[in-house]
Amino acid sequence: MSEIFDLSKFNEYREGNRLEVKRASDNLPNEIWPTYSAFANTAGGCIILGVKEKADKTWVTTGLKNVRKLRKDFFDNLHNKNKVNVALVRDEDVAEYKINGHEILVIKVPKADREIKPVYIRNDIWNETYRRDGEGDYRCSREAVLEMLRDQTERSPDMKILENKEISALNHESIRSYRIRYNYSHDGHPWTKKSDEEFLVQIGAASDETSDHRIHPTAAGLLMFGTYPVIMREFPNFFLDYYEKIDPTLRWTDRVAAHDGEWSGNLYDFYSTVYPKLASILKKPFRLNGIYRIDDTPVHVAVREAMANCIANADYFLPECVKIEKFSDRIVLTNPGSIIIGKKQMLRGGKSRPRNKVILNMLNYIGIGERAGSGVPSIYTTWEQEGFDAPTVEELSGRDGVIATVVTLPLVPKSQNQGSENAETSGNIGDEVFSGKNSVRPDDLLGRPERPEKRPERPKISSEYTQNSSEHSENSNTNNLEDMGNRCAAILQELKENPKISRPMLMEKLNLTERQVKTAIEHIKKSGKARYSGARRGGSWIVNE
């Protein structure tokens, strides 16, 4: 109990996300049970009987007339199924103290394991389930209760077989692109020879264990390879959003939204499009091993890990979206849903319990993400080694329960922020972070996605490879031209091996920026070494030997 309540600090304490005082004299107060439910469903906490909160938020003891009677009454009610569905408190979790001449009773309520949540009272799971938010206990919405119920089972929700959907509901181009990446890293593997339907069954994107004995997509397959309108019919709250906010004078300088109609709107294509945009602001030297880039730095690996965690741990039933934001000094990743194993265990590492196991597996198959439970600690280790400010992980809580996990990856050296002070958290004791009265409300940070608007016109940038530029020295021009030659050679080799390769795939495989790929392709086309034939989305490259 000492990690939550220490008698020597009594006069310093204030009510918060893990501390609650209640004035009790002869009888056990009824309002103790919503607090019990709230603490159990959130981060745990202590209920202190015989104390009241003054107007200035300080505490004063009022005392208990018969502390032993109240203790017995508490345990009698705790084991009454008509009062509460789960008895979490043990005898050693309850302690009696004497302070200022008054007796008080301190009850430590543990955080409930996900397998037994939700903890509710009065036999009413839908109306009497509570979560803690700052100093208050709030009824959970139906969506928050359903989230806890989904998290109970070892079968993740993305394993569900969608017998009302056909394989044709999946996007063929997304599957083809995924298989190219899979084949590239699994040369000679038996799955590379299978048909698309058989391959999808093997990776968990489809199943033949159906009532009609035909192959149908799983929820994971639809989320990874479907199209936005079809996904929305199964997951009405599904949405993916990426913002680039580099120029403070503009609302955003680049955006990728699931509903803009320019792409499929599925998880795989979202990752394939967004990761190269994030990688473009990460520092990397230009080094080649033959024709391939070898500068995939630990920071790049960590960002991919963070994206995999964001996508695989999102609860796609909740009314919030997966949102990734790129700023000049940080990357922010937001996913709907709480951290299943808790923030403390997630940061400690050693356990992997993703919300969507199949989706994480599919990402792992193409080299994205870490399954052994060391992924998040490795991100912190990488940031420490790079000298950046430490990443932050927060669970933003609304009055209907935890609705979002937000991970911030600062790209600023520690020395630049040494003078900054941490925000006060007088009542929020422990490892979990939940919003209090001074916190940013979820509606301010999350919200529903905005409707598409015209993209801001980007400033025209002259080619970095112009030989006649007076701003570059002769040596600079020579180095630029040499780099351009290497890039073109690397891209030509990729076009030869995979004539249908996309620009985002080139960006990721060769660790090049969007601009570098575009410039190199223009050089290749002008030189006559390759040309593009066919429709924009269905054509292919022809390399002239």
Image (cartoon, rainbow, N blue to C red):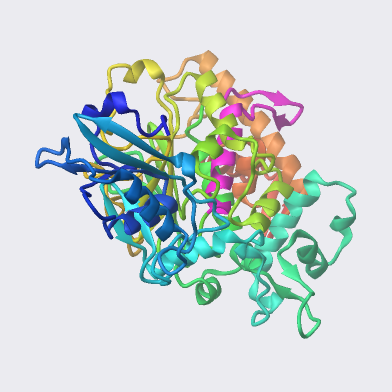
> Could you tell whether 455 is left or right of 511 in the image?
left
* Rendering quarter of residue 407: top left
In the image, residue 397 lies at what x, y percent? 35, 51
Residue 256 seen anywhere in this rendered image of the structure: no
Which quadrant of the rendered structure holds the C terminus?
top right
Q: Is residue 294 magenta?
A: yes
Camera-side residue: 203 or 285?
Answer: 203
In the image, residue 386 lies at what x, y percent? 52, 20
Q: Residue at x 64, y 75 (%)?
A: 169
> Could you tell whether 199 is left or right of 49 in the image?
right
Q: Residue at x 47, y 33 (%)?
A: 281
Camera-side residue: 46 or 251?
Answer: 46
In the image, residue 221 lies at what x, y percent? 66, 65
Give above or below for 430 relative to 416: below
* Rendering quarter of residue 239: bottom left
Q: Residue at x 61, y 36 (%)?
A: 375
Q: How many labels, in total? A: 0
Give above or below for 44 relative to 213: above
Q: Is residue 90 magenta?
A: no
Q: Residue at x 60, y 42 (%)?
A: 507
Q: Which residues are magenta?
A: 284-313
In the image, residue 60 lies at what x, y percent? 16, 36
Q: Residue furthest bottom?
A: 212
Camera-side residue: 242 or 399?
Answer: 399
> Could you tell whether 183 is left or right of 320 in the image?
right
Which quadrant of the rendered structure holds the N terminus?
top left
* Rendering quarter of residue 349: top right
Residue 163 seen anywhere in this rendered image of the structure: yes
